[in-house]
Image (cartoon, grey):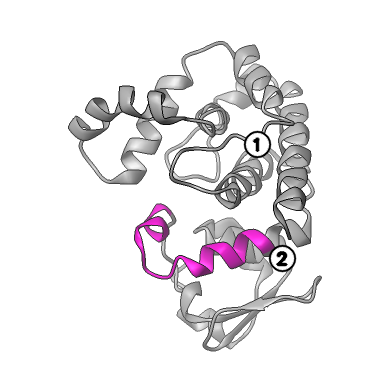
């Protein structure tokens, strides 16, 4: 996918995620998401924080430096802080990003794609809601995640052994990684690669022996 395709996929998934959020009951916003320790509201708040520019980053830097824990702790803290704003503001900010090509400083559009694809399912699946994911977009996101290797960006995701396997999609012509094979639909491969255990039941193959459940 080129940049135009990536941004089109981001816009599509942002718009449909905003539609889903607007349909939620108040109690559903307080439910646990697939992201360990995060509520649905926390995840929605995190999705509004995808366009932090240099000036904003510099303003937040002293707080981040003083905050205990690694990058995941800082990310969760920032989402919790943003989650205090009204529900309508959260959904409105996600929808307002549609059509914009701004992204967080130091990252790429592919990180924005990973965020909306994975976090959209973090919201939808535990609520038994349907939020279809483009296999092509999921393949692009998964390939980018695999390219992280063992670098700092990979630490954002819970490690479950899939990076030691060859991943092969059953609904699109895509494969990535090396090692014993793990097969499944592209959405499940992406979510499992991101450390979401809820999708592991959709996968099969010899490489599943590597996976910590």
Residue 132, position as x, y percentages in the image: 79, 48
**What residue lies at 53% left-to-right and 85% top-to-bottom?**
178
Instruction: Bin the neighbour count of mark 1 within 10 Å (Cα to Cα): few under 14, some 14-19, many 20 and up.
Output: some
Residue indicated by mark 2: 186
Residue nearest the viewer, comparing 130 with 93: 93
Circle 1 — which element? loop
Residue indicated by mark 1: 101
> Vertically, is 187 above or below 42?
below
Residue 197, position as x, y percentages in the image: 53, 59
Circle 2 — which element? helix
Instruction: Bin the neighbour count of mark 2 within 10 Å (Cα to Cα): few under 14, some 14-19, many 20 and up.
Output: many
Residue 144 part of the magenta-drawn span: yes
> Vertically, is 113 above or below 213?
above
Q: Which image quadrant for residue 29?
A: top right
Closest to the camera, between mark 2 and mark 1, is: 1
Q: Disc 2 versus disc 1: distance between alpha carbons?
A: 25 Å
Whether residue 2 sits left or right of residue 32 in the image: it is: right
Highlighted range, magenta: 140-156
Q: Which image quadrant for residue 93?
A: top right
Magenta portion: prevailing SS class: helix
Q: Which quadrant is home to the N terminus?
A: bottom right
**What residue lies at 52% left-to-right and 88% top-to-bottom?**
179
Residue nearest the viewer, comparing 37 with 12: 12
- Mark 2 and mark 1 in contact? Answer it, CB < 8 Å: no
> Vertically, is 89 above or below 162?
above
């Amino acid at each position: 996918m080129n940049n135009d395709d990536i941004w089109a996929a981001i816009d599509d998934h942002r718009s449909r995620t905003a539609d889903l959020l607007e349909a939620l009951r108040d109690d559903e916003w307080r439910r646990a998401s697939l992201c360990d320790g995060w509520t649905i509201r926390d995840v929605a708040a995190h999705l509004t924080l995808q366009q932090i520019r240099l000036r904003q980053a510099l303003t937040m830097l002293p707080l981040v430096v003083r905050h205990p824990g690694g990058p995941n702790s800082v990310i969760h803290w920032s989402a919790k802080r943003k989650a205090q704003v009204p529900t309508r503001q959260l959904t409105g900010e996600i929808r307002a990003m549609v059509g914009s090509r701004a992204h967080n400083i130091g990252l790429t559009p592919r990180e924005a794609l990973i965020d909306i694809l994975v976090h959209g399912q973090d919201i939808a699946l535990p609520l038994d809601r349907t939020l279809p994911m483009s296999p092509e977009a999921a393949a692009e996101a998964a390939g980018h995640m695999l390219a992280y290797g063992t670098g700092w960006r990979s630490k954002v995701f819970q490690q479950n052994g899939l990076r030691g396997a060859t991943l092969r999609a059953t609904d699109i012509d895509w494969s990535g990684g090396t090692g014993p094979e793990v097969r499944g639909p592209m959405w499940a491969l992406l979510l499992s690669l991101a450390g979401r255990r809820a999708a592991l039941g959709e996968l099969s193959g010899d490489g599943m022996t590597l996976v910590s459940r």
